[in-house]
Image (cartoon, coloured by chain):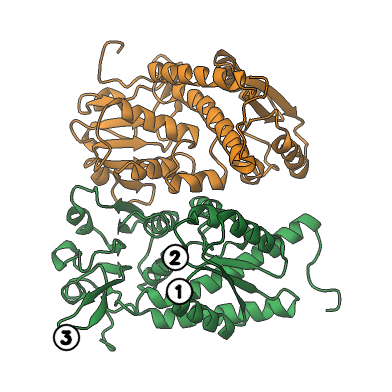
Chain colours: A green, B orange
């Protein structure tokens, strides 16, 4: 697979984004505004440990501070909200991420909405989602933004592009739809109630799939020459009896029809953390912009 | 036209919604929480006078207080924002609407975002838009919500319905798309960059049109039996030399193909103000719910 140009690989895109983030972070730090991301975990840290370690390593590579705050599994929602309000008010904290899953008694949407929109680096606050609808596209939910980055790698002109998104989740399918509508694509969103997903999928120049059904999209559901972005991450037992990760697309057959296809793993996944870090810089720059418009001052330190 | 059952008329729907609002407003007032809508106009009031008078009359019919606040055309954006912050803090004000147009130096989006989301009865704050994406559908931009109400009048099952929206504006086309996605429809959004609007429109069970082009949608662009919701309001000179209002759909020819069609005027228009008043009650009820969850108290007056 390594030399097959049909594969849209996430690694190089992630590297490029991280290099941009690193330059941005260095400049902000030199001006007295070091970016710092606070990671909130509630309860069993082991379940999310591998994700958090990866975020921390990548953040530090790009010069973004990363601080873990761990809360006991029996914290109440009000206590957690109060802790978040404290971080909202703390000027040293420039971004906040809540690691999922959280215990069942914690209402995740209310917790995410408690994060100040200016520090919402996951792009999940309702106001962040609304801002995308209003064509402010630079801060979007990480997986959605990562998927759109991969489509852009194809060089296809997004204006007038026929896009079909299979899966209408609030943080993946729908934001992909708004992001691409704002870029001029004609977008259709399909889901489990759609009469014929195949009929829509077959007319798509670009097909995004995020439903969590292993190999649901077969070759006969894809238009020849299409770009196929597979966002699914499913674990299944392979022919060798070991667990393996597969996407929502039957990659082996679809790659003979599509012009571009994302491998799973190795497609959207690696870009997601890079987008989280880019969002951290977007958030910091919005905080600085608000400071400037509020106080009308140049926000560099006087010492410079 | 009066007896043609193909016409989806807005009047009766508006009446039904207003009757519900009236009962709601009476109950809230009896419990010590009278709803009050503040209308903000900036500069030339004549341009919006007819709209404001209509809103005021309908509000008073339903028992919602209506107060006009008029600001001079040369008010600065900061002064206007400060005035809105005052209304946000004023417990007697339960809803705020900014009448458009405003003078060119007033950034309308920033002003709308200054309104507290709990008092945003127009549904235009980014957080209000984001809440719709998160399937909280009871408070949406008025014209979008009014259009969806009319579709529901047909009795069509929204689950799996093939919907095409022509026009991707932030406050009409896009919110219609999210509202219907959340109800289970398969939605495609077309716009001026779409390669063939006709190809999409012809496969729609329900077709929404909001582009501002007189009679753009002809009979050969509509699927037989479709529901056609015409949101356009265009002024043109009629054969008698007088100005008349026409929609974006060529009603005369399309009505022979469609099973349902909205007249213009008399379709979506009359429902819009009713939705504004319903939104005012939703906003008030959210304010009361926040009070209850924050203070854990029954919020009826002790005297009752």
Residue A58 tag number: none
Q: Position of residue B134 (x, y in %)?
A: 44, 48
Disc 3 + disc 1, Cβ < 8 Å: no
CA gap, disc 3 to disc 2? 30 Å
Q: Which residue is mark 3?
A: A240
Disc 2 + disc 1, Cβ < 8 Å: yes
Note whether A83 is above or below B219 in the view shown: below
The chain under label 2 reads A
Q: Position of residue A235 (x, y in %)?
A: 27, 74
Mark 1 neighbour density, 10 Å: few (under 14) some (14–19) many (20 or more): some
Q: Which residue is mark 1?
A: A48
In this image, A35 relative to A15: left or right?
Answer: right
Residue drawn at point x = 15 percent, y = 74 percent: A253
Q: Position of residue B294 (x, y in %)?
A: 63, 43
Note whether A66 is above or below B7 in the view shown: below
The residue closer to the viewer here, B80 or A92, is A92
| Residue most extreme to the right | A303
The residue closer to the viewer here, B205 or B26, is B26
Note whether A219 is above or below A105 in the view shown: below
The residue closer to the viewer here, A164 or A112, is A112
Note whether A252 is above or below B117 in the view shown: below
Q: Which residue is mark 2?
A: A101
| Residue most extreme to the top | B3
Disc 3 + disc 2, Cβ < 8 Å: no
The chain under label 1 reads A
Question: Going from the N terminus, do you reach mark 3 or mark 2 first?
Answer: 2
Mark whose residue sits in front, 3 or 2: 2
């Amino acid at each position: 697979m390594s030399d097959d140009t049909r594969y849209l690989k996430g690694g190089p895109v992630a590297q490029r984004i991280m290099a941009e983030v690193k330059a941005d972070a260095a400049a902000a730090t030199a001006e007295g505004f070091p970016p710092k991301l606070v990671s909130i975990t509630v309860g069993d840290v082991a379940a999310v440990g591998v994700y958090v370690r990866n975020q921390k390593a990548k953040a530090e590579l790009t010069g973004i501070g990363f601080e873990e705050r761990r809360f006991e599994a029996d914290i109440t929602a009000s206590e957690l909200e109060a802790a978040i309000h404290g971080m909202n008010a703390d000027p040293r904290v420039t971004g906040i991420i809540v690691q999922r899953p959280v215990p069942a008694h914690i209402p995740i949407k209310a917790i995410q909405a408690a994060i100040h929109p200016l520090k919402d680096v996951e792009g999940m606050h309702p106001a962040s989602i609304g801002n995308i609808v209003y064509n402010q596209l630079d801060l979007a939910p990480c997986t959605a933004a990562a998927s759109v980055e991969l489509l852009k790698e194809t060089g296809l002109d997004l204006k007038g592009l026929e896009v079909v998104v299979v899966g209408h989740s609030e943080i993946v399918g729908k934001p992909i739809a708004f992001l691409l509508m704002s870029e001029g694509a004609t977008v259709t969103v399909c889901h489990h109630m759609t009469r014929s997903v195949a009929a829509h999928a077959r007319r798509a120049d670009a097909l995004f799939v995020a439903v969590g059904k292993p190999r649901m999209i077969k070759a006969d559901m894809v238009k020849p020459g299409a770009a196929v972005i597979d966002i699914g991450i499913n674990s299944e037992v392979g022919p060798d009896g070991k667990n393996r990760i597969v996407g929502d697309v039957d990659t082996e057959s679809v790659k003979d029809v599509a012009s571009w296809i994302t491998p799973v793993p190795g497609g959207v996944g690696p870009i997601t953390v890079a987008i989280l870090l880019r969002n951290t810089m977007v958030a910091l720059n919005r905080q600085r912009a608000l400071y400037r418009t509020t106080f009308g001052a140049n926000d560099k330190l006087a010492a410079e």
